[in-house]
């Protein structure tokens, strides 16, 4: 029998494959729907059809297109699968048309075939053709009938319906009754197409001759070969009950809403019986009725009221046929049919299924890109099942209905921009046309992936930074910041220098990650006041995008430079050592108040307030004589010069800036009060000696002390020699009396009052130059014996002691005659003598040496001055000693 079934399946599959091939050819012209037809009961792994070929896909395209099947109903998806290698559609589970579709005349399975790159959907429908794999089956194996012997021929008795799940020609076709002399079977067809058997009495029964009958009832279908089912008829012949119950109608019809609550009355059936007594008492009940119908309805035995027992579901069963029987007390039975129509109620909201979602979607996806597939289904019928679909929410998406009802594509309606919206949340709303309308919702979240379509943008196009000079190397200058609207590596910004003003690159550096700009070295306002660099910000995308910003750094001044005195020269200050002769200014004694003496010129390398200079006179022998302009630096006389003012004036001015803290410098100016340069030269010589450095001054002080000691010893020795000379010198010392002086003659008077070194300046003139020569004096002519107090006393040269005597051959000087000093004449011109400033070291030194040889300032005594004394000459010699030491050789010294 199994072999015959397989042969029947092969014969059935043969005529099915040809329509499937023709259907596949048609699908190429209309790729939106592909149809296949296969018989049921195919084994697992059976070929349904070349799905990939029918979709126009080559085997080489299959890995990239990722062909697969999907459906909103998961129970339908389990029956079929597609091969990833060949793209052919196979049966993945046994197909039972009766289980899948029940009593429906046609049975098909619909699903979607999805392909990627690009995303598209195709609708596939597989028709399941019936195979005669089910035999007709009676609800009961045995039928018990009691028929009165008085039953007239032609009486009919319902035997119910045999069930056959198959459809079409394989369904139930008729009934056959075992041959007998009393009964025959006839086939009746109801309005719903079902066929039931009626037992017809052909000849009157005779209980006395035959009390019971056992017959076999056979139900046959139209399959090839046909299948059949049997049931036993047990007929008992009873005593006469002349009248059977009669229903008011042979067929009752009723309509009931599917939302009717249990307990609702469906309808009333009624039957009458012409008999009397117990034979006329009628009870109602269901005849041969399927079990699922008996679960839904119940009939009252006495009243005949049919009542709903369980809730109805239009989507499960749209109508019921009830077989109600009326039985009298004598056992006679009458039957009627009750057809209950279930009315649809809009009790099912549309169901939305997201078949496929392509998320994330790149933001540069073109308009019209399919991003999701949506399937909508409503189990209701009529207007209650008609669904309209829309999308709510602010998103650049739209719904496009597919050619087959119930499927939609979600496509991009406009360009996407991740920087404006990283994801789009929309709600797909499906609404039916029922009253009231029901709706279903499904949330769709679509993420947008980033594309490097934004360059970094600086917060400012140009940055300015202010850094005080003398900053530490590595000090932060400022931080630049650029923002990139992209995400991930596309939005990761790095910084570097991209150029700038000439020489600006070594000054700063930028940190690649943070954008912090650091100083590479200490800035100096005096060298560089501002510079600019270009900073580039670049993201990590491929290709990378970048932008630049200008960073301008302004160096702020600090008070790090003290004022520098340009005049008087720095060599004139107290700290200068052997820097040459100091400048001087000659102010006539006839100068009035406001007379311009000099101008202190100073500069400051700083700027702003740090370079604002003010002048102040901080040291002067006579503060009331001079004043300095606080802003101009001009040194002027504050009053008229008088004869009482010292000839030499040493002025110290301080130059101060306005920085915090303030820095300063000093300028030393030597002023000589004289009518002419020649008159000022002696004072200048004294000033030159005092202008030496502290070290030289200390040296000369030590040297002067040594010379004074030597002078004291020499004086004592001379006194001893003078006393010995009176007694007559020994022969060995006679040579000392010969040529006591040099050929040039004595340059120092033999008599002096103040104890000084016997040292003098001689002016030796040669053609074109003046040479000063310093020499130790030879022993003087015989001196009178002088007491020590007179020798070291403070008397003036003009008041010689009467006890003093002149040397040999020289007349004694008159006591009242003043000592006259002959000045050595300088070769300088009169104009040079009137000059306020020495023209050079040579000329001024010669003038000083010439005037020092006389021992009097200016070469002559001023009116009102005391006579020249020997102490003044010795002091002049001491003051001229450093100048002479500069020109005299050590051996002469």
Image (cartoon, grey):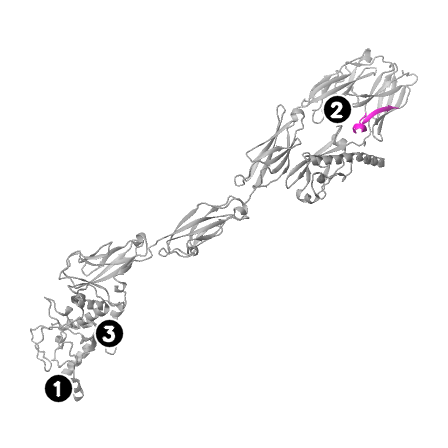
Q: Earlier in the sequence, mark 2 or mark 1?
A: 2
Quarter of the rendering containing residue 48: top right
Choose top left, top right, bottom left or bottom right for residue 751.
bottom left
Contact? badges 2 and 1 (CB < 8 Å): no
Can residue 346 be seen by looking at this rendering? no
Dot 1 falls on a residue whose secondary structure is loop
**Above or below — where is 308 with respect to 843?**
above
Magenta region:
162-177
The answer to whether residue 223 is left or right of residue 571 is right
Q: Specify the farthest residue to the front.
A: 29
Please name the residue that numbered disc 3 is placed on: 887
Q: Which residue is mark 2?
A: 293
- Look at the numbered discs 1 and 3 and tell me whether their residues touch, using CB distance below 8 Å: no
In the picture, which quadrant includes the N terminus?
top right
- Mark 3 → mark 2, Cα distance in angstroms: 151 Å
The residue labelled by disc 1 is 727
Label 3 residue SS: helix
Query: Are circles 3 and 2 on residues that touch, CB within 8 Å?
Result: no
Q: Position of residue 861 (x, y in %)?
A: 12, 69
**Nearest to the observer: residue 591 or residue 353:** 591
Q: Is residue 52 visible?
A: yes
User: 503 or 723, which lies in front?
Assistant: 503
In this picture, residue 579 sits left or right of residue 494: left
Residue 438 located within the stretch drawn in magenta: no
Mark 2 residue element: helix
Q: CA distance from mark 2 to mark 1?
A: 185 Å
């Amino acid at each position: 029998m199994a072999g015959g079934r397989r042969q029947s399946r092969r014969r059935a599959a043969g005529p099915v494959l040809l329509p499937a091939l023709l259907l596949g050819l048609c699908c190429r012209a209309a790729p939106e729907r592909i149809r296949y037809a296969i018989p049921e009961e195919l084994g697992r792994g059976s070929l349904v059809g070349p799905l990939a070929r029918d979709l126009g896909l080559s085997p080489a395209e299959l890995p990239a297109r990722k062909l697969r099947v999907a459906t909103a109903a998961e129970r339908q998806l389990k029956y079929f699968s597609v091969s990833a290698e060949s793209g052919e559609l196979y049966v993945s589970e046994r197909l039972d048309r009766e289980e899948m579709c029940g009593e429906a005349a046609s049975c098909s399975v619909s699903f979607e075939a999805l392909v990627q790159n690009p995303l598209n959907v195709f609708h596939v429908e597989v028709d399941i053709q019936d195979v005669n794999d089910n035999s007709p089956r009676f609800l009961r194996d045995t039928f018990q009938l009691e028929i009165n012997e008085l039953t007239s021929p032609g009486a009919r008795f319902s035997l119910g319906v045999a069930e056959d799940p198959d459809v079409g020609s394989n369904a139930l076709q008729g009934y056959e009754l075992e041959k007998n002399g009393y009964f025959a079977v006839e086939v009746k067809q109801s309005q719903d197409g079902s066929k039931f058997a009626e037992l017809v009495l052909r000849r009157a029964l005779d209980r006395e001759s035959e009390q019971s009958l056992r017959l076999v009832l056979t139900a046959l279908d139209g399959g090839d070969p046909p299948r059949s089912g049997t049931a036993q008829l047990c007929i008992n012949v009873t005593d006469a009950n002349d009248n059977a119950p009669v229903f008011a109608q042979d067929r009752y019809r009723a309509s009931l809403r599917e939302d009717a609550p249990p307990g609702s009355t469906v309808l009333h059936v009624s039957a009458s019986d012409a008999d009397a007594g117990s034979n006329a008492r009628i009870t109602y009940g269901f005849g041969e009725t399927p079990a699922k119908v008996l679960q839904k309805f119940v009939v009252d035995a006495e009243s005949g009221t049919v009542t709903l027992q369980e809730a109805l579901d239009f989507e499960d069963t749209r109508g019921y046929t009830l077989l109600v029987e009326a039985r009298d007390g004598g056992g006679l039975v009458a039957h009627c049919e009750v057809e209950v129509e279930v009315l649809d109620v809009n009790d099912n909201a549309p169901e939305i299924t997201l078949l496929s979602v392509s998320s994330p979607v790149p933001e540069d996806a073109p308009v019209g890109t399919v991003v999701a597939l949506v399937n909508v289904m409503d189990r209701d019928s009529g207007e209650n099942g008609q669904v309209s679909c829309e999308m709510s929410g602010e998103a650049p998406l739209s719904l496009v209905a597919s050619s087959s009802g119930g499927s939609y594509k979600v496509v991009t309606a406009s360009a996407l921009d991740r920087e404006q919206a990283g994801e789009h949340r929309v709600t797909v709303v499906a609404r039916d046309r029922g009253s009231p309308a029901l709706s279903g919702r499904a949330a769709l979240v679509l993420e947008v992936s980033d594309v490097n379509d934004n360059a970094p943008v600086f917060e400012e196009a140009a940055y300015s930074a202010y850094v005080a000079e003398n900053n530490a190397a590595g000090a932060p200058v400022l931080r630049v910041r650029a923002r990139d609207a992209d995400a991930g590596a596309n939005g990761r910004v790095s910084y570097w220098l991209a150029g700038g003003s000439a020489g600006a690159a070594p000054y700063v550096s930028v940190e690649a990650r943070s954008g912090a700009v650091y100083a590479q070295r200490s800035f100096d306002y005096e060298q560089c006041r501002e510079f600019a660099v270009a900073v580039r910000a670049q993201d990590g995308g491929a290709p990378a995008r970048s932008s630049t910003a200008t960073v301008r750094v302004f160096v702020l001044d600090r008070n790090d430079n003290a004022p520098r005195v340009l005049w008087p020269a720095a060599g004139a200050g107290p700290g200068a050592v052997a820097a040459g002769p100091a400048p001087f200014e000659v102010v006539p004694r006839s100068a009035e108040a406001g007379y311009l003496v000099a101008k202190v010129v100073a500069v400051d390398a700083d700027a702003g307030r740090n370079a604002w200079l003010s002048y102040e006179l901080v040291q002067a022998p006579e503060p009331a004589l001079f004043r300095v302009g606080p802003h101009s630096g001009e040194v002027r006389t504050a009053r008229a010069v008088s004869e009482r003012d010292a000839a030499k004036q040493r002025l110290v001015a301080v130059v101060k800036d306005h920085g915090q803290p303030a820095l300063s410098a000093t300028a030393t100016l030597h002023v000589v009060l004289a009518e002419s340069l020649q008159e000022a030269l002696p004072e200048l010589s004294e000033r030159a000696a005092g202008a030496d450095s502290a070290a030289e001054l200390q040296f000369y002080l030590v040297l002067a002390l040594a010379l004074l000691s030597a002078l004291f010893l020499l004086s004592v020795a001379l006194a001893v020699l003078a006393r010995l000379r009176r007694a007559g010198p020994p022969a060995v010392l006679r040579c000392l009396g010969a040529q006591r002086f040099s050929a040039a003659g004595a340059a120092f008077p033999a008599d002096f009052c103040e104890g000084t070194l016997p040292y003098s300046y001689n002016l030796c003139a040669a053609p074109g130059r003046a040479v000063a020569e310093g020499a130790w004096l030879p022993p003087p002519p015989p001196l009178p014996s002088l007491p020590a107090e007179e020798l070291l006393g403070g008397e003036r040269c003009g008041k010689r002691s009467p006890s003093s005597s002149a040397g040999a051959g020289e007349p004694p000087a008159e006591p009242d005659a003043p000592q006259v000093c002959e000045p050595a004449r300088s070769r300088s011109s009169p104009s040079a003598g009137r000059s306020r400033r020495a023209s050079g070291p040579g000329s001024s030194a010669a003038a000083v040496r010439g005037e020092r040889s006389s021992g009097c300032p200016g070469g002559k005594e001023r009116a009102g001055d005391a006579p020249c004394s020997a102490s003044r000459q010795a002091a002049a010699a001491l003051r001229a000693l450093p100048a002479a030491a500069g020109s005299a050789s050590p051996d002469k010294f």
